Image (spheres, grey):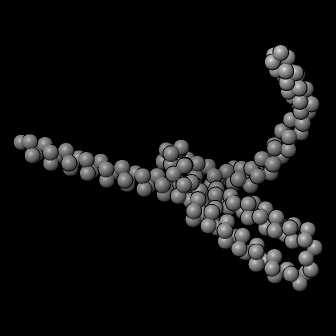
Amino acid sequence: MSRFRVLCAASLLLCVSGQTLADATSHAAVAEKFLQVVRADKLTVPVYAQVQQMFAQRFAESKAPQSKQPLLERYQARANTALDRAVGWDKLKPDMVRLYTATFSETEMKELVAFYQSSLGQKVLQSMPALTAQSAQMTQAALEKAVPEVNRLLDDMQKELGEAKK
């Protein structure tokens, strides 16, 4: 009788672990679909552009003759290769899938996919970069108004700390 219980328990465990593996695989597949829909593979495009701009700026600052343009292009290509090794989509994707599957259930991921495939979701995707940039500019402008007062408070605190040492 004891062997029968052990066999049943082992069978149950095998079934549960198989189902868990299937669930995890399905969950990961939905997360991958979500990342595809939101074009997450394009997240690093600004990084590449910024690095390219840095090389072009350094090239211009060096007042190199135009005949050296192939040198700039060669180094820009090498920089792209270095970025590919560090932040290429094939490097980031597994961690991104884990991040999203740890944060959202499979059902939630399916709802997110449905939303971002909708016309409103597509509008959000198209509008978000500009909205984020404008929000950052607005916040920066508002923050600049507080800088003088914050600096005054820092000076006041420093004065009080100096007096506390006496």
Q: Quadrant of residue 33?
A: bottom right
User: How far across and down, in percent of the image, does residue 89 sit?
Assistant: 61, 63
Q: Is residue 4 left or right of residue 161?
A: left
Observer-nearest of 162 and 45: 162
Query: Can I make out residue 153 in this image?
Result: no
Closer to the camera in the image, 30 or 122: 30
Above or below, 91 relative to 105? below
Dividing the image into 4 quarters, which one contains the C terminus?
top right
| Quadrant including the N terminus | top left
Q: Evaluate whether residue 14 shows in this view.
A: yes
Q: Residue furthest bottom?
A: 67
Residue at 73 percent across and 75 percent down: it is: 77
Residue at position x 91%, y 76% in the image: 64
Where is residue 23 shown, x and y percent of the image?
A: 40, 51
Q: In the rendered view, would you say 150 is above or below 54? A: above
The image quadrant that residue 137 belongs to is: top right
Q: Position of residue 112 (x, y in %)?
A: 58, 48
Left or right for 42, reference 6? right
- Write the residue at 42% across / 56% down: 25
How many labels, in total?
0
The one nearer the camera, 41 or 71, is: 71
Residue 85 in percent (x, y) is at 61, 67
Left or right? Give the position of 71 relative to 82.
Answer: right
Which residue is at the far front? 166
Report the residue at 8% width, 42% height from top: 2
